[in-house]
Image (cartoon, rainbow, N blue to C red):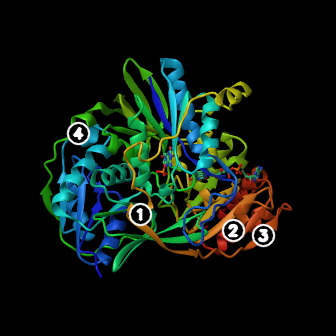
Amino acid sequence: MAVGKTWVFAEIVEGTPAPVVLELLTKARSLGGTVEAVALSPDAEAAAAELGEYGATTLHAGTDAAYAELLAGGPSADAIAALATAAQPDLILIASTYLGRDVAGRLAAKLDVPIIANGLDVVADGEVSVQSSIFGATQNVTTAFLGKKPAIALVRPKSFAAESGGGGAASVSPIAAEIAEQHRGARVVERRAEAASGPKLEEAPIVISGGRGLGDPKNFKLLDQLASLIGGAVGASRAVVDAGWVPYSMQVGQTGKTVKPDVYIAVGISGAMQHTVGMKNAKTIVAINRDADAPIFKLADLGVVGDALKILPQVIEEIKARKG
Amino acid sequence: MNVVVCIKQVPDPNSPGQLDPSTHNLKRDGELVLDPGDEFGVEAGLRLAEKHGGEVTVISMGPERGLDAVRKALAMGAAKGVLVSDDSLAGADALTTAKVLAAAIRKQEFDVVITATESTDGYSGVVPQMLAGLLDVPAVTFAKSVSFEGDILKVERQTETGVDVVEAKLPVVLSVTASVNEPRYPSLKGIMGAKQKPLDRPTPADLGVDGLGAASAGQKITAVEAAPQRAAGEIVTDDGEAAKRIVDFLAERKVI
Ligand SMILES: Cc1cc2nc3c(=O)[nH]c(=O)nc-3n(C[C@H](O)[C@H](O)[C@H](O)COP(=O)(O)OP(=O)(O)OC[C@H]3O[C@@H](n4cnc5c(N)ncnc54)[C@H](O)[C@@H]3O)c2cc1C
Ligand SMILES: Nc1ncnc2c1ncn2[C@@H]1O[C@H](COP(=O)(O)O)[C@@H](O)[C@H]1O
């Protein structure tokens, strides 16, 4: 049985839907029924064409400037809750991003409906179920919603490939929600971007990630050199992010980014399950680690037991030599 | 500044978890610890209270054995503990958990409620915002640093691409990441002192939230299967030639 009406929460960045929104719309189309997008952002309407192309027939758009100045999660959840009570969607798909998690939790509390988090797939088969994986992706779990609507599923980015559905622009239906006074108590006074160069981590064909085994933050330079030689992006384990060696935006894993490059090179990373859930679907995995028993070797197509600080410079020289 | 910190006891993250094959609830018979993520929350609460006056209360919902986690937080310096345990709450989903916690929090005086961004065992990561929604206060999530100036809480907040600096009035729900501080170890004196600290054990009925529990949960695990695992590949030990092997491997895959 198809889902009657699915909403996709559309996170808009500079007038463009975040890539994961297109992934969710693609999935929503496959569930049958009506697909609509909801976006709360001053520039939401600019996204109507692209959201429509990927499957949304309607874009419910709230464009109050305050969504950009406040922490958007709370006011967005309030607006969606009010709208959902009137329009009664069966299912709301939300990406597990920072904003998505903020919106989903508060929305569920407002509507008194369940959430299933960490979704990797959504299945509509009489009832709606969400698949997720637990214990470092060693087990797959299917969880069904038990009838209270709307069901809210938080889905991890990169779970689906985005495919255009060829639809025309979504028709814009304005949301005129008042922003509750309490939300004005928390404002963003400054935004600082973390510097990034080269291809984006989530999109790069090659990802080279470093961990505590690099010994010192300055050794990340070796990864940068290798990455720029072969057109890769540099990632990291949480251990080195927490230690302040590199910014969080580089973290791969359960609480960081999910990557699916053609080649993932793990350097000085032990391979804790919280790390491997973010990279185990890479096409090919190379690992360099001093410890022959490191769990990362269980996933590696090529595992090298040795000192990364010795091997990396040799790899860089060898590639330079072959490139001539 | 009165702070409530929500803490949870979880299976030791260093030993892999398991589900009970019949109930699909998380098995809790192995080694249990205070969620390492929540240690950052306790520390953040203690620092606020130490600097600006007031007390830290830790609140946990979970089985009887969760007392150990509460005691650890008391040993770190929290002033009192609240543990809600009841058989009816076994298998509670995130929203049920948040309802019980919110009911327990409402019985306290609080300026700030602190949680971790996600728990180590369930990692749904939605309880903090649910609490804010139920308590009807704003939430400042993913904090990397927290300070209090005048009557404003100043938070550096992790985002997808960088950091947002947020200023918030109290009361507020705050979720903290692992980069927010370095949690202290309980001192011997703290451990001894923890035994004398007040410990409240309300039932769901005391909190006015009886009859929630698994029966009211809006979701149910219907299948658990082993995930397909990657096959192991070639392992070489570096004898001075490994770099060449790596480059050959990349060349075979047409990466270079
Ligand atoms: C709730 C939760 C969420 C988490 N989320 C994430 C996440 O999103 N991403 C993540 O990465 N982690 C995450 N973690 C942390 C994870 O459990 C590990 O602690 C972390 O991945 C370890 O990082 P590491 O491999 O760099 O460090 P370590 O585990 O310390 O490993 C370092 C490795 O380097 C090797 N080494 C040392 N010297 C050398 C050398 N000279 N040459 C080669 N190898 C060397 C060592 O043999 C060792 O295997 C999470 C943990 C929790 C509890
Ligand atoms: N049963 C619980 N008792 C106390 N705090 C909890 C409980 N469950 C979740 N929390 C808090 O909410 C955070 C996020 O949990 P979760 O949303 O389940 O990933 C945890 O790190 C705790 O701070």
Which of the image's four quarters has the N terminus of chain A? bottom left
Q: Is mark 4 within 8 Å of ligand 2?
A: no
Nearer the camera: disc 4 or disc 1: 1
Label 1: chain?
Answer: B
Marks 3 and 2: in contact by CB < 8 Å?
Answer: yes
Q: Horizontal and vertical percent for residue B211?
A: 39, 55
| Left or right: where A189 falls relative to A237 | left
Q: Which residue is mark 4?
A: A66
Rounded to the nearest whole Å, what is the CA distance between mark 4 and mark 1? Answer: 40 Å
Name the residue type under label 2: Ala
Nearer the camera: disc 2 or disc 1: 1
Mark 2 lies on a secondary structure that is loop
Q: Which residue is mark 2?
A: A300
Q: Which residue is mark 3?
A: B235
Label 2: chain?
Answer: A
Nearer the camera: disc 3 or disc 4: 4
* B125 over B24 or under it: above or below: above
Badges 3 and 4, same chain:
no
Q: Is mark 1 within 8 Å of ligand 2?
A: no
Rounded to the nearest whole Å, what is the CA distance between mark 2 and mark 4? Answer: 47 Å
Name the residue type under label 3: Ile
Residue B215 is labelled as 1
Q: Horizontal and vertical percent for residue A145?
A: 37, 69
Mark 3 lies on a secondary structure that is strand
* A70 over A137 or under it: above or below: above
Q: Quadrant of residue B225?
A: bottom right
Rounded to the nearest whole Å, what is the CA distance between mark 2 and mark 3? Answer: 8 Å
Badges 4 and 1, same chain:
no
The residue lying toward the viewer, choosing from A138 and A247, is A138
Q: Horizontal and vertical percent for residue A244?
A: 59, 38
Nearer the camera: disc 1 or disc 3: 1
